């Protein structure tokens, strides 16, 4: 069996039958030749067989070609079997959307190929560019935080229905490797892709590690020292103690991972989740019992940056990626960069903690406070889910009544939710970025949920989290956006071949020109007001920063527990003002120095660039922009097809602009801390040079003097850089909006090209799909409003 048949069966949701087709030697050619009797033999079950026959029929019809007889046949087929009828066999709405998307993509691929054979006119080039721009796959990122032992792995396994995927239990999870879990869109196998840090990065890390060892020989209890020993022991075994630091980079220690030496990614492929888990565990975990009278194993997580685990045929991961994240950043710069990128790109964050310590446990709340700016104003997080695991565990409970047990569990879960909500409302720093409505609390038990005989699965609330992931997939706008864009492009193609519309086109162009100019003026006015508001906030922030920076810095430079602090501060200055201790606590001098500036703009920033789905950037001025194409269609029927294109182009442009603004606003927000960090680099270099006696005093004085001397310039510069980036974002937004619409009007209403082929059949098919999707969305919105 070739890959084509394998991919088709996976695409059609029939991957369970791949082996059957493989045994019978079905390739692409024989797939198209299958008759009903052969299909009955291949797939004896009625349900999947009916699905297969429907998919095969549509596949044989295929997108239209230049053969008019084929086009006519396909048109008749679809008149007899509308999209609504074809959906009746589908058990899941998301699957039918997947099918629609696949079919429309095939259609547009054929359209593109046909256009390639035509004269390369201005309109032809424009159309091909627009078709290429249609294909944007946006995945929702869900970040999962939680300390080792809180039950993250078991939770993820239970939710996605793969109990043996992520390892859990006695083997210790490392604190730095990020694990992404997503759907396998390439083949029906379980895969793990291991991405390593570079050799140069590990060499630099070894230099830092060796410094920690040399400086901590007299104090083996130092947390950084213990963290370093654990890291070296995992990778080299106890052998590292007898190896010179220079020889730790010898290739012989990396024979099992040649990809690390070659700066490549390692791919593991397996038939089952259990088999894959056993293979990739050495890249994410280590066993503290290793070396006790048995062969020493190598654990490679110290040189791993990220592991991507891909699961076949999982509808919950169709458009969603779950990311198991460490509590805060990492000493390794590339790992830290990736961590910040993941956190900043999460649309939802899950904070996982054990039920019996949901409020008392400090670590989950510290994670939330430390990462809130990355997730909120500096990110795109819309929801925080606080997930209390092991909700079925009650100590000292020996009652025989199961009903009494479940009643008590329910009561305790309700109380836990109330306590978590109260604790969340106390977090002033978090509340700058998130409202109370952003938090939801779940009480779950993976163990209870996975019991086959369990009659109380819904009490674990794991089904609610599954429903949440399913909604992320169902609400995913990729299908509608793609089909809408395709409908607009095909409308423009057909409209371009129409004649005798000069008068109507001129009138419409004049009307549209006036609408655009008027609304651009309104947008610019709103943006100018936003700029002024930020300038006022930053002026106050600069004054507070200059006045209070020394006081702000003092608790970091002079901690209450100062034993061994000279080693910690040495790590801080050697790593550009940032250091993560062995316990995971992060010291960030740059963030502390810029805190008055960020505090001054947090409220305004949240209003201007909200993450909530119902709100829009720049107080909604982009979303409120409209050409009112539907009204113009009623007035100018002769150019209806061109106006349909302009309507879909306007929606696509606003979606694209909002995505650009969402990404660029992160750069604007972090420019404050970034400018301070850049200004402090010279100071850190000077402080890092000190050795021997009085090192701590010299480092402190160097930092304090630099802050004192530069504070009147540093904070004003941070303000200037942020306002510049904000202004640039506003100008580019205006320019993109105006340029995109004017180009679309120019090509649709001022350009005729009768050489473009006829695609009326394709237009009719895509129009049916578009109307069906629009109808489904309107129905969902009505149901949501009624609920």
Image (tube, rainbow, N blue to C red):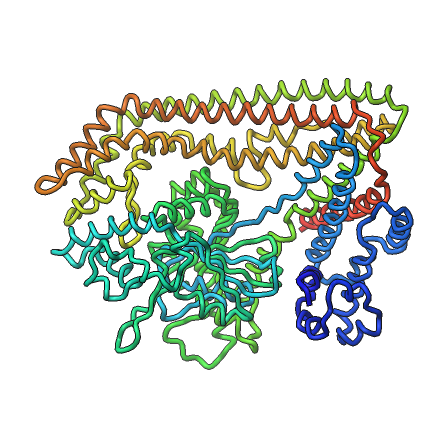
Determine the residue positioned at 79% across, 62% down.
Answer: 56
Vertically, is 139 above or below 663?
A: below
Most foreground residue, 285 or 768: 285
Q: How many marks?
A: 0
**694 left or right of 610 in image:** left
Residue lying farthest to the bottom in this orientation: 400
Most foreground residue, 330 or 261: 261
> Does residue 567 appear in the picture of this structure?
yes
Most foreground residue, 433 or 682: 682
> Does residue 325 appear in the picture of this structure?
no
Place of residue 246 in the rendered image (x, y in percent of width and height, measured from the top left): 23, 53
Place of residue 506 in the rendered image (x, y in percent of width and height, measured from the top left): 82, 19
Q: Quadrant of residue 245?
A: bottom left
Residue lying farthest to the left in this orientation: 693
Determine the residue positioned at 78% across, 34% down.
Answer: 644
Vertically, is 363 above or below 736?
A: below
Q: Quadrant of the N terminus?
A: bottom right
Place of residue 651 in the rendered image (x, y in percent of width and height, measured from the top left): 68, 35
**123 left or right of 728 in image:** right
**15 left or right of 608 in image:** right
Place of residue 104 in the rendered image (x, y in percent of width and height, measured from the top left): 75, 48
């Amino acid at each position: 069996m070739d890959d084509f048949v394998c991919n088709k069966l996976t695409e059609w949701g029939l991957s369970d039958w791949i082996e059957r087709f493989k045994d019978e030697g079905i390739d692409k050619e024989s797939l198209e030749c299958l008759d009903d009797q052969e299909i009955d033999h291949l797939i004896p079950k009625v349900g999947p067989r009916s699905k297969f026959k429907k998919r095969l029929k549509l596949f044989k019809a295929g997108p239209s070609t230049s053969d008019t007889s084929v086009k006519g046949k396909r048109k008749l087929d679809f008149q007899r079997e509308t999209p609504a009828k074809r959906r009746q066999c589908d058990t899941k709405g998301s699957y039918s959307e997947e099918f629609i998307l696949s079919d429309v993509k095939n259609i547009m691929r054929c359209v593109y190929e046909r256009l390639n054979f035509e004269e390369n006119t201005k309109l032809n080039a424009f159309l091909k560019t627009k078709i290429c721009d249609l294909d944007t796959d946006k995945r929702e990122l869900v970040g999962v935080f939680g300390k080792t032992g809180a039950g993250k792995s078991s939770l993820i396994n239970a939710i996605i229905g793969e109990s043996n995927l992520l390892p859990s239990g006695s083997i210790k999870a490392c604190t730095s490797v990020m694990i992404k879990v997503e759907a396998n869109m390439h083949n029906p196998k379980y895969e793990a892709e291991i991405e390593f840090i570079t050799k140069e990065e590990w060499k630099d890390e070894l230099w830092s590690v060796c410094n920690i060892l040399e400086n901590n020989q007299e104090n083996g209890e130092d947390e950084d020292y213990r963290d370093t020993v654990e890291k070296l022991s995992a990778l080299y075994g106890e052998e590292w103690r007898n190896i010179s630091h220079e020889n730790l980079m010898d290739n012989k220690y990396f024979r099992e991972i040649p990809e690390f030496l070659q700066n490549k990614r390692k791919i593991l492929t397996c038939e089952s989740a259990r088999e894959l888990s056993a293979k990739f565990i050495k890249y994410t975990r280590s066993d503290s019992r290793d070396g006790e009278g048995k062969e020493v194993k190598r654990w490679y997580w110290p040189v791993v940056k990220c592991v991507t685990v891909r699961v076949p045929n999982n509808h919950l991961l169709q458009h969603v990626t779950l990311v198991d994240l460490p509590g805060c950043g990492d000493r390794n710069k590339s790992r830290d960069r990736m961590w910040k990128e993941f956190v900043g790109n999460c649309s939802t964050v899950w904070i996982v903690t054990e039920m019996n310590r949901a409020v008392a446990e400090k670590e989950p709340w510290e994670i939330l406070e430390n990462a809130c700016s990355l997730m909120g104003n500096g990110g795109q997080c819309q929801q925080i889910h606080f997930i209390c695991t092991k909700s079925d565990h009650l100590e000292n409970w020996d009652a025989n009544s199961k009903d009494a047990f479940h009643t008590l569990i329910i009561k305790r879960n309700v109380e836990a939710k109330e306590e978590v909500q109260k604790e969340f409302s106390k977090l002033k720093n978090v509340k700058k970025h998130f409202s109370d409505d952003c938090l939801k609390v779940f009480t779950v038990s993976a163990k209870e949920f996975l019991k086959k005989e369990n009659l109380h699965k819904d009490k674990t609330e794991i089904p609610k989290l599954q429903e949440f992931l399913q909604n992320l997939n169902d609400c995913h706008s990729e299908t509608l956006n793609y089909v809408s864009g395709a409908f607009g492009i095909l409308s423009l193609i057909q409209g371009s071949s129409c004649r005798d519309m000069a008068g109507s086109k001129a009138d419409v162009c004049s009307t549209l020109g006036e609408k655009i100019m008027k609304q651009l003026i309104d947008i610019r006015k709103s943006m100018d007001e936003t700029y002024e508001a930020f300038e006022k906030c930053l002026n106050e922030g600069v004054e507070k920063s200059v006045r209070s920076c020394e006081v702000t810095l003092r608790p970091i430079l002079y901690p209450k527990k100062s034993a061994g602090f000279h080693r910690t501060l040495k790590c801080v200055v050697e790593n550009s003002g940032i250091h993560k201790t062995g316990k995971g606590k992060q010291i960030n001098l740059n963030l502390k120095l810029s805190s008055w500036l960020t505090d001054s703009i947090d409220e305004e920033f949240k209003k201007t660039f909200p993450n909530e789905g119902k709100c829009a950037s720049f107080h909604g001025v982009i979303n409120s922009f409209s050409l009112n194409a539907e009204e113009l269609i009623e007035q100018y029927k002769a150019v209806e097809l061109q106006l349909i294109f302009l309507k879909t182009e306007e929606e696509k442009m606003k979606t694209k602009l909002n995505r650009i603004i969402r990404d660029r606003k992160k750069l604007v927000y972090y420019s404050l801390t970034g400018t301070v960090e850049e200004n402090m680099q010279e100071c850190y270099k000077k402080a890092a040079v000190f050795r021997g006696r009085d090192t701590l005093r010299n480092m402190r004085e160097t930092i304090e003097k630099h802050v004192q001397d530069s504070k009147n310039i540093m904070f004003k510069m941070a303000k200037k850089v942020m306002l510049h980036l904000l202004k640039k974002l506003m100008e580019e937004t205006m320019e993109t909006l105006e340029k995109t619409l004017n180009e679309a009007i120019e090509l649709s209403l001022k350009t005729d090209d009768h050489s473009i082929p006829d695609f009326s059949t394709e237009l009719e098919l895509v129009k049916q799909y578009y109307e069906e999707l629009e109808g489904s969305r309107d129905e969902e919105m009505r149901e949501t409003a009624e609920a």
